[in-house]
Amino acid sequence: MSRSMGIRAAIVLAAWIVLVTFPQWSAFWESSRFAAGVIRQILIFAIFASSLNLLVGYAGLPSLGHAAFFGGGAYAAAIAAQRLGTDELVVSLGAAIAGAAVLALVIGFLAVRALGIFFLMLTLALAQMVFAIAFQATDLTGGSNGFSNVHRPVLFGLDFNAAGDLYVLVCVAALLVGLLLWRVTTSTYGRALVGVRENERRMRALGYDTRTLKLSAFVLAGAIAGVAGALSSYEFRFVSPNDVALGTSVTGFVMVLIGGAGTLVGPVLGAAVVLLIERVLPSQLPAQTVLGIVFIVFVVFARQGIVGALRRVART
Amino acid sequence: MTFEDALQQALNGLSFGALLFILAAGLSLIFGMMDVVNLAHGAFYMLGAYVALSVTRATGSFWVALVVAPLALAALGLVVEPLLLRRLRGRHLDQVLITIGLSLVIADFIRLRDDWGWGATVRSLPFPPGLDRSISIGGSDYPTYRLFVIAFSAALALLLYVLHRRTRVGALVRAGVGDAEMLSALGVDTDRLFSVTFAIGAGLAGLAGVVAAPVFGLQPGMDVDALIYSLIVVVVGGLGSLSGAVVGSGVVGPADTFGKVLFPQFALALIFAIMALVLLFRPTGLLGRVRIGR
């Protein structure tokens, strides 16, 4: 590990410790509990957006169907816990990861055949099929009512029912996913994905099986989105077709682009901005309209997102 | 399924396909010219339906709405294209992303306009007088409005074909679809051509919204449904050509209708399966000129 990387790791660790102890050191603040809730949700969506960013930012695959894996994971977690009658974290989280990964394998198998805009159309349409299943297969998914009163999980006797403990769980999950994505994107595999984004033809000429590369990234990103979905089911204690809907896919995409695609921090910042607009903005302002306009402004004027804009400022 | 049922469902499938044609033609036209998949197409469709609702309430006539709503949407397209899309010319993916932002804004706008009688509740548009009854076909009653949809859509297809093949604008559009850059080099104002194309596409989406409203009603989420169906149609039929939209809607409309009757649980799965098969074995779509994948 080089020295600058060591410093970076120390900064990240310190920031994480500050974050994970937020409920303690902000206890004097009257809105501390509300803020901790918003941070939990930001982190859950940061995991979701980061997984999408692996596709959009690194592999150059503009997926507009990522909610299929977020919602698929949430449903898998809720269904497994209910059918098996257990609150064990390992069971519901495992089911979420496995379910989302399988779903991503099926959808990805078709979608990676298409390029660019067509990939976007296909992922959108195929995810909508998952939405239709969630909506129509009432026996399995509860139909439009979804699952309410989802149990929060336990792990080795540790109970995550208390908001404070759930907070720690989400922080740990976010850190682990962050480390995993850092490891993946800096590996030769991650560089190969960027190669596919930049020039797929050339990668093929170099002997890479680009379709398998893209499919593997799609499955990995799907599995991570499944983790976010499971966490969301614990957080809201509710799973509904809304989790699989196009709106959730769009939200993830907006987070990635606003924050900065192809950077590890970008999606986290994007998730923070979007959730602050949705949760904290005065309620008389129409959140979706603001979001749409902010998104358009970023696409037109700051395609590299917040991170790109900050980098440009830092350089000058 | 008796013969009467089959005939009735065949007509239903045909009228749904006819509606899908109006919807998909606009999407396909814009793509053919500009290489942009307009993801606000569903939102345009929805806005068309709501404008028709207001116009019908104000004037009392569905037929006025049938003219005004598409024109309003075309006007919106005429504003949106130069304002948002033109500055991103050549960045196709970014243009697509812009249309996502646009659809968010439009859907939210409709949701919040309770004071215009829009809002988040389900609204309905009555059948136009004269087309609100049924006639007997093959021994069973069939709603005349659905027959009107089939005839209207067929007439529109014919009109678009003639415009496309026999007029100067049609020639320009065909040339633009072929090679917009060359057209520009020949001295044609492609900026204006793109704006007009986008406006016509938006107008067609609005028209589909008006035509569909008496049958399917108006509610939040109709924009997404319309977008998904039109995407499936253009993928199946092939993007960027009028005949592709005809074939795609001719396959998807009846397939969806019969699927819903025969195995209601898997109706959506059926049309997605058709799309997947087309994609695997004919990546250009049935009649397309653009390869969707490899």
Image (tube, coloured by chain):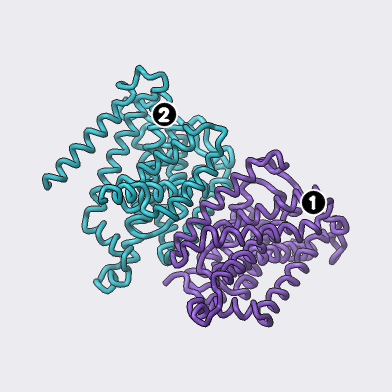
**Figure quadrant of residue B141:** bottom right
State the residue at coordinates (49%, 34%): A281
Quadrant containing the C terminus of chain B in the rendered view: bottom left
Tint applied to chain B in the drawing: purple
**Figure quadrant of residue A152:** top left
Instruction: Report helix, strand or loop for mark 1.
Output: helix
Disc 1 versus disc 2: distance between alpha carbons? 46 Å
Chain hosting mark 2: A
Tint applied to chain A in the drawing: cyan
Q: Are marks 1 and 2 on the same chain?
A: no
Chain hosting mark 1: B
State the residue at coordinates (70%, 39%): B115
Label 2 amino acid? Gly
Residue behind mark 1: B56
Residue B152 position (above or below residue A25): below
Percent position of residue B219, x then y: 67, 46
| Front disc: 1 or 2 | 1
Label 1 amino acid? Thr
Instruction: Report helix, strand or loop for mark 2.
Output: helix
Q: Nearer the viewer, residue B222 or A254?
A: A254
State the residue at coordinates (19%, 40%): A9
Percent position of residue A62, x then y: 42, 58
Residue behind mark 2: A37
The numbered mark at residue A14 is: none
State the residue at coordinates (63%, 64%): B199
